[in-house]
Amino acid sequence: MKTLIKNGTVITAEITRKADILVEDEFIRRIDEYIEDDEATIVDASGLLVLPGGVDPHVHLELPMAGTISADDHYTGGKAAAFGGTTTMIDFVSQEPVILAENIARHRAMADPKASIDYSLHMNITHFDDQVAEELLDLPQMGITSMKVFTAYNGRLRLDDGSIFKVMRIGGKNNLLTMVHAENGDVIDILVAEALAAGNTAPIHHALTRPAWGEVEASLRAAALAAQADSPLYLVHMNVAGEVDQLAYARKHGILAMGETCPQYLFFTEDDLRRPDGAKWVCSPPMRKAADQQGLWQALENGTIQVLATDHCPFFYNGRQPIVYEGREVAIPGKELGEKDFTLIPNGLPGIADRLPVFWTHAVNTGRISPNRFVELTATNPARIFGLYPKKGTLAEGSDADIALWDPEKELDYGLAWAHHRTDYNLYEGWKLRGYPVKVFLRGTLIVDDQNWLGKAGGGRFVHRQAGEIL
Ligand code: URP
Ligand code: ZN
Ligand code: ZN
């Protein structure tokens, strides 16, 4: 099967050029100024930009949390991703008390039949001992080259600093990247108990009990541990300007530290948590202040932060009220679980469909970020850091034909109906956007054609990752 994408403007992290792209089966065969091929189906991309499919390295699908489960699975989440121009995502395996290989096998048994775009996995390390230390060495042969550890969620997910140091030391010696969720779990627990005792149960107290300084301190702690362990480090969901300062400090001192932020931290503040429907914005870490947004934007512009991910972890706002999804009523308990107590609100937001179109409108159309830097932040850098490049994250001969045809002039009133997340709200409801994918190919197969979904469960594949690069 051959497809010839003609007359488009190809955008990669490095270049912008008018070129045709010949796709054969699952791969990009040729990119050239002018290509003819009588056997190929022609797709006219005149007036369109040709981007590599987005790579979102931070999503949580079917994640059990707070007595419920995140509302997208590998089918619905992949479908939403594809509508927004993303064709690869990386989910997290929870560490249950069995061997890591079994955790991974279970996760894959859940995800593989549903996957509608390509995906890979990070391994959460939330319990560490000598046996886990041994098992970490097996991760690369299972296609997993990154681990996430937490300095918060005491008694549940948190690892003590010594264990984080040991995980990092193993990572440093074995090409495994350690990702750190950096908050101060001890301070959070004290402030949460005090807030509840004082009757402060509204969503804003989610942010007020997780102070920004805890993240500043924990991100520098993570960087210092990485330095001592001779390990690379990736700070997830950075949301505080002071964290950016710590990352810049670490990088200046030669520490192999990298970081990501997410759109919600660029566009919302803790004031959104004060709204009557503030539970919609509850995620960890929380929204911050305007000055933090500025720090994050600057870090995206100047290269201190390498990746724009989503931390997509959607819940219903009102899980008592079903929505209609693909003709069937669906209701999944969600944010209403915490209507009397912010600590019971499941943490997380929808975002995988929103990332590219919202960021394009506010970053590229405003001139803050070039189209090439847009591709770098949302596809190429995540692919390189997480060992998917050049199979994913770029347009090059031999790469997977994961392609988004992007109409830079397409205007829309964005929201729930466009996003296709399996939830009942969208954070960007009513936002005016300009720039949107009109056709999306996954390994050469057209899976989104305007607003038509052509993909299917099982159409996506697990991608076995290599060791990543340090950027
Ligand atoms: O609120 C969030 N982000 N939920 C997902 C878990 C995490 O820590 O990334
Ligand atoms: Zn996290
Ligand atoms: Zn997350």
Image (tube, grey):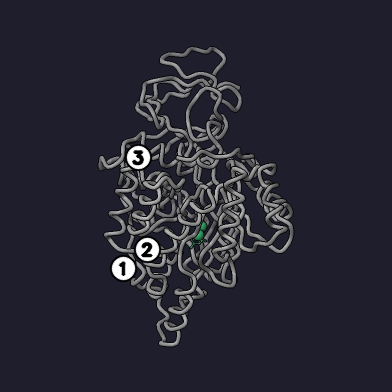
Q: Nearer the viewer, residue 52 or 316?
A: 52
Measured as percent of width and height from the top left, residue 327 is found at: 57, 54
Mark 2 or mark 3, earlier in chain: 2
Measured as percent of width and height from the top left, residue 92 is found at: 59, 54
Cα distance between the residues tagged 2 and 1: 8 Å
Which amino acid lies under the numbered mark 3 shown in the image of this protein? Gly
Which residue is most to the front? 228
Q: In the rendered image of this protein, does residue 429 appear above or below residue 282? A: above
Looking at the image, do the residues carrying marks 2 and 1 touch, with CB atoms under 8 Å apart?
yes
Does any portion of residue 428 appear in the rendered image?
Answer: no
The quadrant where residue 155 appears: bottom right
Which amino acid lies under the numbered mark 2 shown in the image of this protein? Met
On the image, numbered disc 2 is attached to which residue?
287
For label 1, being within 8 Å of ligand 1 is answered no
> Residue drawn at (43%, 23%), measured in percent from left and top?
44
**Neighbourhood count class around disc 2 (C-alpha, 10 Å): few under 14, some 14–19, many 20 upward:** many
Measured as percent of width and height from the top left, residue 263 is found at: 38, 52
On the image, numbered disc 1 is attached to which residue?
271
Which amino acid lies under the numbered mark 1 shown in the image of this protein? Asp
On the image, numbered disc 3 is attached to which residue?
435
Secondary structure under badge 2?
loop
